[in-house]
Structure formats: structure tokens, C-alpha cells
Amino acid sequence: MTQETTDVAPLKRDGSLYLTGNYAPVHEEVTVFDLGVTGRIPAELSGRLLRNGPNPITPVENPVDYHWFNGTGMVHGVRLRGGKAEWYRNRFVRGSEVLATRGGPPVAGPTRGFDNSNNTNVMKIGKEVYAISEAGCLPLLLSYELETEARSDFGGTMGDAFTAHPRVDPLTGETHAVTYVPQYEKAQYQVVTTEGSVRHLVDIPLPGRPMVHDMGLTTKYAVIMDMPVTFSQAAAMSGDALPYRWDPGHGARVGLLPRHGAAEDIVWCELPGTPYVFHTGNAYDAEDGTVVMDVARYESMFHTNMLSPLDDPARFYRWTINPVTRRVTEQMLDDRAQEFPRHDERLVGRNARYAYTISSDDMPKGFTGLLKHDLRQGTVDSVDYGPGMLTMETVFVPSSEDAAEDDGWLMAYVHDATTERCDVVIRHAQDLATPVATIHLPVRVPFGFHGNWIAD
């Protein structure tokens, strides 16, 4: 593992794709009641299906230099209750850029870092729902109707920043996060209580200042990602909106940090080659003492196009991390282009049988299908959404608290290019072929990043 950053000149620099088609922003905040439905919404679904993504609020002066990761955040939500789709709302996440452009009262709360790009995820942490991002953004508290209410540093207990990818332990309800800011050669491991305060914080030295987008969580460990996309001072000095570069000389490793341990307790394990991972699936402690973690694995990142993360597609892999040999072995689970692995979150940190990803036949234009991986049998069920239909991240919702692992609903926002509108499609995880309900939104929902089901 080297500790120096080497700028690698990208082959292309063109972000204009992410301002066209269904990547293009929408300009109006909309509220619509009593949505049309084909099929029948399961009566047990009572809550909101929320998602977040970039939606520039002002015209982009130079589309070639636009970076998708930096667009203004916009949250979308559909509220379900009693077998009905009661409303759809979209709201800008009201950071300083939105307030400067559209006015409105200032947002309460502490000020540090930046708040223009809380565009990556929206989820429940403790008792509240937040729009969240990484690299310096404070979480932004949202109301039930998706209005931005306040900036939060968890009552002054938060470390330097927060993350877009925390993990909630289903046994304790606590939220685990690995966070970073570009200014420091470190990450931080933070554990947030159900009351919304940080009770455990560990500084993790990370020379080279890598981008740390996700983590793994088992019953024993937080899994730290140290991958070869690192901060570039030269890119920052030149004014790049995202000053990170592909840096294969940095190496690639994962660290096993005991959940109650300190930085000196981390067991660093080298990965074969120099892969990059944005998103991990589930992770668990195997009986032989290894840690197993599923990932959407890239051969490189920001290598062919600095402004496009999807030029070189990810494949679905399993890593087996050995703390004794300090090595990682890889197994390709599926060779199709795919991303956004999800699973039954009642099994976070445990040996889940099923994982769900979305797949593509034409990256980076969009994701065309849904894959259900049976990790025990080594089989994959798939469904293609059909001509002109492009899906976003799929969320699994169990049919009841004690339902079997795949007894539940797979829910996704799906773009219909023939109408330039969006549907929310609900399928049963045991029968991918036929949707049980399709909720018709009268508007377009741009491709974005992440979302979650927030039960009432």
C-alpha cells in the first residue's frame, strides 16, 4: 500500500450526458394527491418510498465540465396507506444554493462544511429522516412532507462530517458510519444512538485521502474501504468540482475495525489488483473467522472519463477477507453490468441468502433490469423492464416483521421514456415476473442515487 497520490490524466472529460434525457433536472416542486394505480397496492405498506439525487437548480454554464455528483439535491417521495398512493412530492434539499436562488427563510442549525449537495441518500437515523451526503455535508433534517427543517450535527456530538452510506444494526437500532472530509488524511468511524447522538468515534489514519463512499458492517467489525481514488491537490487548485483522481499506485485494501475498538486494532487486508467499489452489499462473520462481503466491483474509476462513474461498468463480486493472512480472495458472482446492491435490512451484518441489484445492457444510459441473487444456491432470477423503461435502485420491504427473508416487496422508481414520466413499480420478491402494482406519477423523476422505505 503506497501512500502517495499520482494524478492520472483522464482520456475523456464530458459530463453533458448527466444533463440530458432522464438525467436532466426538473425545475418545479410538485405535490400531487390520489395517484393512479394499475393493480393493487399491498395493504400492509404504510409509509413513504423516498429517494434522493442531483438536480441542478440553476443552468449549468459549461455542461462539458458538469459533474453528476455535485448537482443540487432533490428528494422525491410517494406516500402509501390503506392500499392507496396518497401523494407524490418532490422538494429541493434547501442548502445555501437553493436559498440563494429561490429565497425563503434561513435553515436553522449549526454551520460548518457545506450544504449545497445533500443529494445522495435519504434515510431514517435514530428517530428522524435526513438528506445526507459525504465529504463535509451536515445531515439536513426533513419533515414528513419533505421540507428541509434544520442542519444537524447530532447535538454537537458528530465528528468532522457524515456519510451517504451508514448502516443500521437491526438488533440495536444504532447507525454505523465511516465518514471523511477531503482536508484530512483520515476517516472517522461513528456510531449514532437511537436518540440521535454519537456515542463512539474513532479516527482512522488514511494517507492519500481516498474517497470513502461506503462501508461494511458485521456483528464484530466495521469494514473500512481504502480504494485507489484519492484527493488531488492539483485538481483542487485548478478548480475541479470533484478533485479526486484514479490513483492505482495507492493500492486497495480493506480494514477490519472491531466495533468497540480503536484505530490500532484495525486489521488491514490487501485486495488483489486495484479495484474500486462505491457500493457494498451485505457483510457477515463466517464461522471460520473470515469476513464475507458482497460488492459492486469496478476495474477502475474516473479513468476513462473523469466526469462519468458509469463508463466502465461494475460486476457483482464476493470478497472473503482473512484477518489471519491479511489477504482478500475474490469470487465473481455475476458478470453482468450491475450496481446498487440491496438486501433485507433485517439481516444487516448477518448471513443473508438474497441480494438484489439493478442491471444494464447499455451503460451509462441507464439500468434496464432487476436481478435477484440467491447467494446460497448460486442462481440468479432476472426481469427486464422492457423497451424504454429504465429502473432506479430497488428497495426490499418485508411483508411483516417476522416474514421470511424473501417474503416481501421490491419497490423501485422506473422511468418510462415513451411518456417521459415515472412509475413506482412494486413486485413480490418471490415472483419477479409480474408487478403487483404500478403507481403512475404525472411527472418525471430524474435518475439519482439512493432511497429507502420509511415505514410509518
Image (spheres, rainbow, N blue to C red):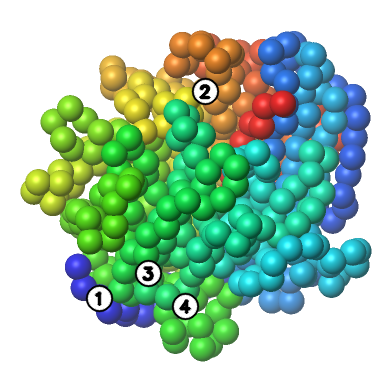
Where is residue 145? Give x, y as percent.
Answer: 83, 40
Residue 101: image location, x then y, percent: 86, 70
Does the residue at mark 2 contact the one at mark 3 (Cβ under 8 Å)?
A: no
On screen, residue 110 versus residue 265, left or right, reads: right
- Marks 4/1: CA distance? 16 Å
Residue under label 4, please give it.
Answer: 183
Under mark 1, the amino acid is Gln
Quote the CA–CA distance across marks 3 and 1: 12 Å
In the picture, residue 333 is in which quadrant?
A: top left
Q: Quadrant of residue 456?
A: top right
- Three-letter residue code for mark 3: Lys
- For marks 2 and 4, the one nearer the N-term is 4
Of the two numbered discs 2 and 3 in the rendering, the one whose residue sits closer to the viewer = 3
Front residue of this view, candidates 394 and 218: 218
Looking at marks 2 and 3 on the same chain, the residue that comes earlier in the sequence is marked by: 3
The answer to whether any part of residue 356 appears in the image is: no
* Foreground: disc 2 or disc 1: 1
Label 2, on which residue?
383
Q: Amino acid at mark 2?
A: Val
Label 1 element class: loop
Label 2, residues with CA under 10 Å away: few <14, some 14-19, many ≥20: some
- Tell which tag, 2 or 4, sits nearer the viewer: 4
Q: Is residue 249 above or below residue 237?
A: above
> What residue sits right under mark 1 in the picture?
3
Tell me the amino acid under the disc marked 4. Gln
At mark 3, the secondary structure is strand
Residue named by callout 3: 186
Cα distance in 3D space between marks 2 and 4 = 43 Å
Disc 3 + disc 1, Cβ < 8 Å? no
